[in-house]
Image (tube, rainbow, N blue to C red):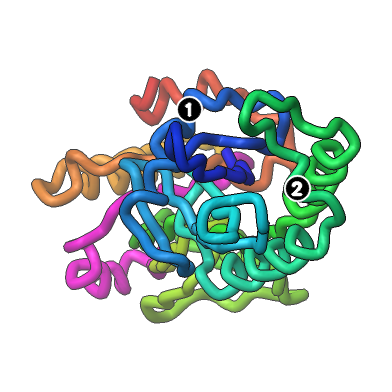
Amino acid sequence: MNAFILSYFDALIGPSILEIMPRDMKKEDFQLIPDLMNLYENEFFIHIFGNLQTANLIFDISSMGDRGGVMTFQASIASTKGEINEDIARDILEAFQKQVSELTGIQTAIPRRGKPANKQARENLREIMDGVFRSLPGDIVRLHSWDAKVFIFGEASVGKTTILNTLQETVPKATLPTLNMDATKIKVSNLTMTAYDAPGQENLRVLWKPYLKGQDGLVFVLDSTRVDLESLTKSKHLLRDIISRTSMEKLPLLVLFNKNDLSEPDLPTLERELGIT
């Protein structure tokens, strides 16, 4: 959830929300934001309320009819999606300040001393705010980032390396057998995954042991075209050997049936034979 909020400081009643974009947002969800005007001076600052992060700019606009000859506003960008990019937010808020200060009749856009707001001036202010909100760049919020280590294993030639290459969009025409432990970093949205591609050849599985510690998840890959009893038995024993280890037993496990495009496997039967139903 992102929102753009304009607060105003009234000398008699204190700070309150003047406008909020999008218009269907509830002011009650952001009721603490105006109070920041009592805590900060005229400046740009970041303030966090639980999972709500705000970037704020308090500024004055000249007004001869007000105490001190100024009107005080606070423009705020609020987000529950992640960490706000301070540099971008500052530029946006300072540009908004300039637009508001140049707005003709801004002093009449606010109801004061029993006088209603000038409808046209208020609508002009809303149009500026709506334009700012709609133009907020995608990178205004840095999504919370996560790092994970995932151990990908299975029998030889089941397609583990090809799957990783596909995720990286660098699929080679031919994939050679993996003869050592390959570590590949894959970034998906805000997740950075280090995938360990384990060689499936039985004589190379001694290489697996050092990499089995500190993993966050397991991916067991099978070739769904290999449905003979011998292949399924080998796969079942390999899977049980890994997930029964103390360091592995509580990790999330994805069983991936690969090469479904080459045949129409009986998945319920495969699951039953592997004991993963």
Q: Earlier in the sequence, mark 1 or mark 2?
A: 1
**Quarter holding residue 199:** bottom left
Would you say residue 254 is visible in this rendering? no
Q: Quadrant of the C terminus?
A: top left
Q: Is residue 200 magenta?
A: yes
Identify the secondary structure beneath mark 2.
helix
What number is the disc on residue 171?
none
Q: Kindly identify the amino acid type of the residue bearing the numbered disc 1.
A: Asp
Look at the numbered disc 1 and give the secondary structure of its residue. helix
The spot of residue 187 in percent (x, y) is 54, 65
From which residue to which does the magenta span run?
A: 198-225
Q: Which residue position holds label 1?
A: 29
Give left or right: position of 9 versus 89: left
Front residue of 180 and 147: 147
Nearer to the camera, 256 or 154: 256
- Quickly name the residue at label 2: 129
Return the x and y of residue 132 as percentages of the image width and height.
76, 54
Question: In percent of the image, x 37 and y 26: which residue is there?
Answer: 276
Left or right side of 179 for 100: right
> The N terminus is located in which quarter?
top right
